[in-house]
Image: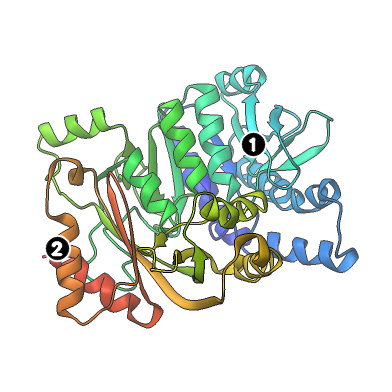
Amino acid sequence: MKFGGTSMAGTERIRRVANIVRKQAANGDQVAVVVSAMAGETDRLVNFCREANPLYDPAEYDVVVASGEQVTSGLLALTLQALGCKARSWLGWQLPVHTVEAHAKARIEDIDSDALLASMAAGEIAVIPGFQGIGGDGRVTTLGRGGSDTSAVAVAAAIGADRCDIYTDVDGVYTTDPRIVAKARKQKAVTYEEMLELASVGAKVLQTRSVGLAMKEGVRVQVLSSFTGDDAVPADELPGTMIVSEEEMEQILEDGHMERQHVTGIAHDKNEAKIILTRVPDKPGAVANIFSPLADASINVDMIIQNVGRDKGETDVTFTVPQTDLPRAQALLEDRREDIGFNRIITDSHVAKVSVVGVGMKSHAGVASTMFKSLADRGINIQAISTSEIKVSVMIDEDETELAVRVLHTAYGLDAD
């Protein structure tokens, strides 16, 4: 079971979480719980680091920011004990959770689960801080923002859990953001592949890395809400949305528990910025000169359009980067102006990406044309397009995002009755 920051924000909410955990354990289950820091706490700790030293040492930064989860894991163990449960906290270095790569963005390599399994077999509820581990040098590491989801999936894989329940402030994965479309429907099940695409194009329910790990390790993940009444039934009887393999999804559809849909969801992301480089030489290696320095600076490039070459052997290249990386990308490209040979750099941060995702696209034609026609009918101009086997994304003006999401949700028949 994993609980996010809003679920752990204060002693009242921690008591509510403890009751949810106690009910699950009372079902006869062996339970491990992964917790995030209280909502807003990690930001507060990050600011302390910046104030202490703007050019902070990432290893010491990890020591500071990992403390948020240490507090909530101890408090949840204490609260469970007050409810008459056997419980103890296990910090990242006590299990230990071995990580590799850099501080502040470490990756979990493996988890020693022997002591944890022995403790759970003895009827103890294990409370584990998410987001933290131990590096090869024996120092505390953190996994990057949103890393507690990844911690939870990694623990579930290490102990061979039947299921990994991720409790958030939403009660499942919806066809789109219910705050934009009131008729959005909660999904009974979504495949790993679909969830991976949805997470990568703006759906905020699960961290992308955690979905990738669940897919690799075959961990069944359930997304559900911790904001239920005290009399709510346990998760076994109140399912949220299951994230499952394609094989399990086929079984769910065969058993008639769900209708087949060509499109699973509509996601949007306003954290996009567009860059246009004009009059780039139309010759081999020119595009590599643009994108190599961006890759070296770990700036993720998404949509790319290269226009047809002009008579003078020149072309315009358009692409998108995360909005937060726009100043760095712009500075890098200006530095390389001579190497690349472009004339002007034009930027626009008032754009958004809207994506249609669904495994059904593999076997069903016309999904993209429905998208383009529906947007055209409402006068929404498409500035760029990118596709994968199960996704079509378009870039549009940021002001038209909500309208586009509503139009597409209706066009694909996803509105609830």
Reply above or below: 58 against 31: below
As drawn, is 165 to the left or to the right of 70? Answer: left
| CA neighbours of label 2 inside 10 A, class few (<14), some (14 to 19), many (20+) | some
Question: Label 2 amino acid?
Answer: Thr
> Within 10 angstroms of label 1, few (less than 14), some, or many (20 or more) residues?
many
Quadrant of the drawing holding the C terminus = bottom left
Q: Residue furthest front?
A: 312
Q: Position of residue 146 (x, y in %)?
A: 58, 51
Give the residue at mark 1: 107
Q: Is residue 99 visible?
A: yes
Q: Earlier in the sequence, mark 2 or mark 1?
A: 1
Q: Which element type, helix, strand or loop, lies under badge 2? A: helix
Give the image location of residue 140, x and y in percent. Answer: 79, 39
| Mark in front: 2 vs 1 | 2
Residue 29: which numbered mark, if any? none
The answer to whether 40 appears left or right of 301 in the picture is right
Q: Residue at x 29, y 57 (%)?
A: 174
Against 388, is 107 above or below?
Answer: above
Q: Nearer the viewer, residue 268 or 416?
A: 268
Question: What's the mark number on residue 370?
Answer: 2
Distance from disc 2 to disc 1, alpha carbons, whole Å, reads: 40 Å
Is residue 292 shown left or right of residue 95?
Answer: left
In which quarter of the view is residue 376 placed? bottom left
User: SS for tag 1?
Assistant: strand
- Locate residue 371: give its quadrant: bottom left
| Residue type, mark 1 in image | Arg
